[in-house]
């Protein structure tokens, strides 16, 4: 992989991890357009590095929240932070189950399946459109809501379904405050990404050559910096009910991906 390709893919991951347009879908499209020549093991390592970068950018943006949640988790008192931590844990259950029992099936879908990405982007567009039209409330995410949002996160493991778009939209459609929905969406994924990275490292499947270090480092920095910008921007957009623009974007890109998928097939 060339340095420029690493920068482009890193920026794509950083922006689309938080903007509701599907990071996995755009990464697959980006690799296809750039003529990705990486073998599956190299592609997997690069993707893991980019996801680690965006997870860290989430921690940076929500550093105060993360510190409060960790403090509440180990506090003996039944406070708001401990309750929030429990909701995060509940939201993780569906994705953990799907990732554990269907990992190989999911990985098989991330092989330049542009046609699937296109159809899933249109599904994302519909969710965003419906969420944008939802009424504003001040409601907090409940325990039941946390599980339903977790189901959306599990479904969003399909390439083309935006994780942030699906989880924020589901939360808003359940009647939750839009800003709180975005905060919950971004924080709930951090433990999952960190856990997945630890699992991949311990499995021994992630191997690299010294020549890859530069490319991996550049991709990491590009994803980390763009991730911080996108995360901050997305919170403001959700608060101001601007999701409809991303709905139109996903719909257009989805149609283009379907055309591109039929062309390559």
Image (cartoon, rainbow, N blue to C red):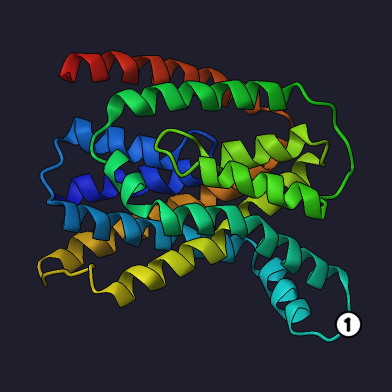
Decide which of 81, 174 is in the foreground and name it: 174
Horizontal arrangement in the rendering, residue 7 relative to residue 55 (left or right): left
Decide which of 119, 209 is in the foreground and name it: 119
Asked which secondary structure carries label 1, the reply is loop
Q: Dot 1 surroundings within 10 Å: few (below 14), some, or many (20 or more)?
A: few
> Residue 21: image x %, image y %?
49, 33
Vertical relation: 115 (above or below) 16: above
The residue drawn where x is 41% and y is 20% is: 254
Horizontal arrangement in the rendering, residue 104 relative to residue 231 (left or right): left
> Residue 188: image x %, image y %?
62, 57
Q: On the image, which quarter does residue 202 sit in?
A: bottom left
Q: Do we see residue 224 in this rendering?
A: no
Q: On the image, which quarter does residue 131 sit in?
A: top right
The residue drawn where x is 34% and y is 59% is: 48
State how many labels appear: 1
Decide which of 170, 68 is in the foreground and name it: 170
The residue drawn where x is 53% and y is 53% is: 95
Location of the C terminus by quadrant is top left
> Residue 157: image x %, image y %?
46, 44
Please give the residue where the numbered disc 1 appears in the rendered image. Answer: 77
> Residue 44: image x %, image y %?
26, 56
């Amino acid at each position: 992989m060339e340095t420029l390709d690493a920068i482009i893919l890193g920026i794509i991951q950083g922006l689309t991890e938080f903007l509701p347009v599907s990071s996995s879908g755009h990464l697959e499209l980006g690799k296809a357009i750039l003529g990705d020549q990486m073998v599956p093991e190299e592609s997997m390592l690069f993707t893991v590095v980019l996801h680690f970068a965006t997870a860290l950018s989430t921690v940076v943006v929500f550093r105060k929240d993360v510190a409060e949640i960790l403090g509440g988790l180990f506090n003996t008192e039944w406070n708001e932070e401990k309750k929030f931590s429990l909701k995060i844990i509940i939201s993780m259950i569906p994705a953990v189950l799907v990732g554990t029992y269907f990992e190989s099936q999911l990985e098989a879908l991330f092989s330049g399946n542009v046609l699937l990405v296109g159809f899933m982007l249109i599904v994302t567009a519909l969710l965003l459109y419906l969420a944008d039209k939802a009424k504003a409330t001040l409601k907090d995410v409940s325990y039941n809501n946390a599980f339903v949002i977790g189901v959306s996160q599990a479904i969003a493991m399909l390439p083309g379904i935006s994780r942030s778009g699906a989880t924020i939209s589901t939360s808003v459609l359940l009647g939750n405050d839009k800003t709180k929905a975005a905060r919950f969406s971004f924080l709930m994924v951090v433990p999952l990404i960190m856990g997945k990275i630890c699992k991949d490292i311990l499995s021994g499947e992630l191997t690299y050559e010294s020549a890859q270090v530069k490319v991996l480092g550049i991709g990491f920095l590009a994803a980390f910096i763009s991730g911080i910008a996108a995360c901050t921007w997305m919170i403001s957009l959700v608060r101001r009910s601007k999701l409809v623009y991303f709905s139109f974007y996903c719909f257009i890109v989805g149609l283009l991906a379907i055309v591109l998928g039929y062309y390559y097939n």
